[in-house]
Image (cartoon, rainbow, N blue to C red):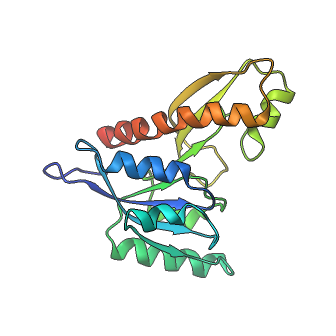
Amino acid sequence: MIKLIGGKRLNTAVFISGKGSNLKNLIKFSLKKNSPIKIRFVVSNNKKAKGLNFSKKYKIESRIFTYSNKQITENQILKHLKKREIKLICLAGFMKILSKNFIRNFQGKILNIHPSLLPKYRGLNTHERAIENNEQYSGCTVHLVNSKLDSGKIILQQKVKINKKDTAKTLKKKIQKNEYVLYPKAIKKLISTL
């Protein structure tokens, strides 16, 4: 159970592997007056992740974990999360699959955003696959993380129309714009139900 005590913001960690556009968006959301979260910590498995620039810019503590041994790495991450009293984890383009043990420690408190209308197109290359299959719609999904890839309980989804001229690149751009609106909404929804 997550409880907001006296309007206190929830200590949140964001996990990234790449450009961090969703991280940037979540930071902006966290700085709003009525935001229920405070981003305390950024985790990355990639020291070259451009998203780390956003944690620097906004003076949020970040740390890089090499994942040379998954179990040891996850235990290190859990220690850091505990130390910072993290209550919610938001995955934002994090390219590692979390173990059952890790998820158990944060059951119902790990969110992920995925660029398709789940359960369709789990995993990678979602835009290419949607276009190849002549889908009329794709979109994005915010879901709770469980031990199966992109299979946890869906919190919110947003449909995006695929036009005949769309390429994977143009579709990605359209969907990303919707992700920036959907992720904060889903966080608010999750926190209000807990």
Residue drawn 64% across and 38% down?
115
Image side of residue 44 versus residue 187, left or right: right
Which residue is more in the foreground, 143 or 140?
A: 140
Image side of residue 122 versus residue 102, left or right: right
Image side of residue 119 versus residue 74, left or right: right
Residue drawn 64% across and 45% down?
150
Which residue is more in the foreground, 113 or 5?
A: 113
Residue 118 visible within the image: no
State the residue lying farthest toward the right: 132
**Residue 108 place in picture, x, y as percent:** 44, 50
Q: Is residue 22 above or below residue 142?
A: below
**Residue 41 place in picture, x, y as percent:** 41, 67
State the residue lying farthest toward the left: 6
**Residue 137 place in picture, x, y as percent:** 69, 21
**Residue 56 place in picture, x, y as percent:** 44, 68
Residue 100 visible within the image: yes
Which residue is more in the foreground, 131 or 56?
A: 56
Residue drawn 72% across and 21% down?
162
Residue 190 occupies which quadrant of the picture? top left
